């Protein structure tokens, strides 16, 4: 068998995470690898051309005297969300919540954030390994803070942060207040060359049962109030003025939560509108393809073929007919046709304060 990695539902089952069971063995192969042919067990193949997919978040387990690569719990959850339209959101959320709350799989920013970073950036840069990183005032260029400079210091700081997150005795305060403390510490460590991993806020709120779905996007508010954000970060470092910083983060959560609820409501209304109108205008009405269209702002023929298990001819006809009746807009980039969901794209493109 080609070098394969056990992934997704099979990896969840291996780690005893969640209640879903794999109906086939999910394996990841390189793009140029030939899928194995077996009558039993059934195999479902996923492919990737990214080298990090075969190195980041991989554990080697010995089964029947054979070394078998399996994605670790954090990587497995990230991968499940990547394929959420194919696996189902319920499975992804169940796995995320169980991993975050399990004593065996405590929140580990060093492991989880590294896995997320490698998946999103599609590289293996990981934590900073070279000295010289400084945090500067964007307006004056003045150095305002110097984060840990070598790899060992960063790893040590992240281990301390893990202890702080998982040990309630170290900071017995309200989870939202603790999230503000965690955010400041993570920002000060600044473990990556690019980006600060604000996803950690969302993971922590899910862990504390304050979020059911990881949809709180604080970055928009932070970017809109960037000068206040960096000013308050610095006043904590220089003057230990924690109260104003905590209030800033709490305000960011409140405003973002209200905007997110509004966005979700609009998406729900648009989904129902599409279902009603497509039922009237097309013979091929089915809930599954319409739900699939609202998974992402755009789709491709290949995605419909893979997710809905239909032929390429059927997928092409389905998408082109929806373009003809104004539900989608086709845009060709290179050799690939992209089909934009007009309603969903409009909702996600309009700034919340402009609605």
Image (cartoon, grey):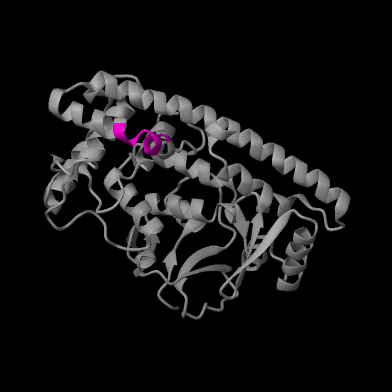
Q: Quadrant of the C terminus?
A: top right
Q: Main secondary structure of the magenta part?
A: helix
- Residue at image point 51% right, 63% down: 26
Residue 90, quarter of picture: top right
Asked if residue 52 is positioned above or below residue 270 in the image, the reply reads below
- Residue at image point 20% right, 31% down: 234
Place of residue 113 in the rendered image (x, y in percent of width and height, measured from the top left): 33, 48
Queried whether the magenta region covers residue 354, the answer comes back as: no
- Residue at image point 26% right, 34% down: 230
Q: Quadrant of the N terminus?
A: bottom left
Q: Could you say which is closer to the camera, residue 241 or residue 36?
A: 241
Residue 165 in view, yes or no: no
Place of residue 143 in the rendered image (x, y in percent of width and height, measured from the top left): 14, 42
Magenta residue span: 221-227
On screen, residue 185 versus residue 288, left or right, reads left
Place of residue 68 in the rendered image (x, y in percent of width and height, measured from the top left): 37, 66
Queried whether the magenta region covers residue 223, the answer comes back as: yes
Q: Could you say which is closer to the camera, residue 237 or residue 39?
A: 237
Asked if residue 146 is positioned above or below residue 228 in the image, the reply reads below
On screen, residue 215 versus residue 322, left or right, reads left
- Residue at image point 82% right, 44% down: 276
Residue 122, quarter of picture: bottom left
Place of residue 349 in the rendered image (x, y in percent of width and height, measured from the top left): 56, 45
Q: Could you say which is closer to the camera, residue 134 or residue 164?
A: 134
Asked if residue 78 is positioned above or below residue 249 in the image, the reply reads below
On screen, residue 36 versus residue 298, left or right, reads left
């Amino acid at each position: 068998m080609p070098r394969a990695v056990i992934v997704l539902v099979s990896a969840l089952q291996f780690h005893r995470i969640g209640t879903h069971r794999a109906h086939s063995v999910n394996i990841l192969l390189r793009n140029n690898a030939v899928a194995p042919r077996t009558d039993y067990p059934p195999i479902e193949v996923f492919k990737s051309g990214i080298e990090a997919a075969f190195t980041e978040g991989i554990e080697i387990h010995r089964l029947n005297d054979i070394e078998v690569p399996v994605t670790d719990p954090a990587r497995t959850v990230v991968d499940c969300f990547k394929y959420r339209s194919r696996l189902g959101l319920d499975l992804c959320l169940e796995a995320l919540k169980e991993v975050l709350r399990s004593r065996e799989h405590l929140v580990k920013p060093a492991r989880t954030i590294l896995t997320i970073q490698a998946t999103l950036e599609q590289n293996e840069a990981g934590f900073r390994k070279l000295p010289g990183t400084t945090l500067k005032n964007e307006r004056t260029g003045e150095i305002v803070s110097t984060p840990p400079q070598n790899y060992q210091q960063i790893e040590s700081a992240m281990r301390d942060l893990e202890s702080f997150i998982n040990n309630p005795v170290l900071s017995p305060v309200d989870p939202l207040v603790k999230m503000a403390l965690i955010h400041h510490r993570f920002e000060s460590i600044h473990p990556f060359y690019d980006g600060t991993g604000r996803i950690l806020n969302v993971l922590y709120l899910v862990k504390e049962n304050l979020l059911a779905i990881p949809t709180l996007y604080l970055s928009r508010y932070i970017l809109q109030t960037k000068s206040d954000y960096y000013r308050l970060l610095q006043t904590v470092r220089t003057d230990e003025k924690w109260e104003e910083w905590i209030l800033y983060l709490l305000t960011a959560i409140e405003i973002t939560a209200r905007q997110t609820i509004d966005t979700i409501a609009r998406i729900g209304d648009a989904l129902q509108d599409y279902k009603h109108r497509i039922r009237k205008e097309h013979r091929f009405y089915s809930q599954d393809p319409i739900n699939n269209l609202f998974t992402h702002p755009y789709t491709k023929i290949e995605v419909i073929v893979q997710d809905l298990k239909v032929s390429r001819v059927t997928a092409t006809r389905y998408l082109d007919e929806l373009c003809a009746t104004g539900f989608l807009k086709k845009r060709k980039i290179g050799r690939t046709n992209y089909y934009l969901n007009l309603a969903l794209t409009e909702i996600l493109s309009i700034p919340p304060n402009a609605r």
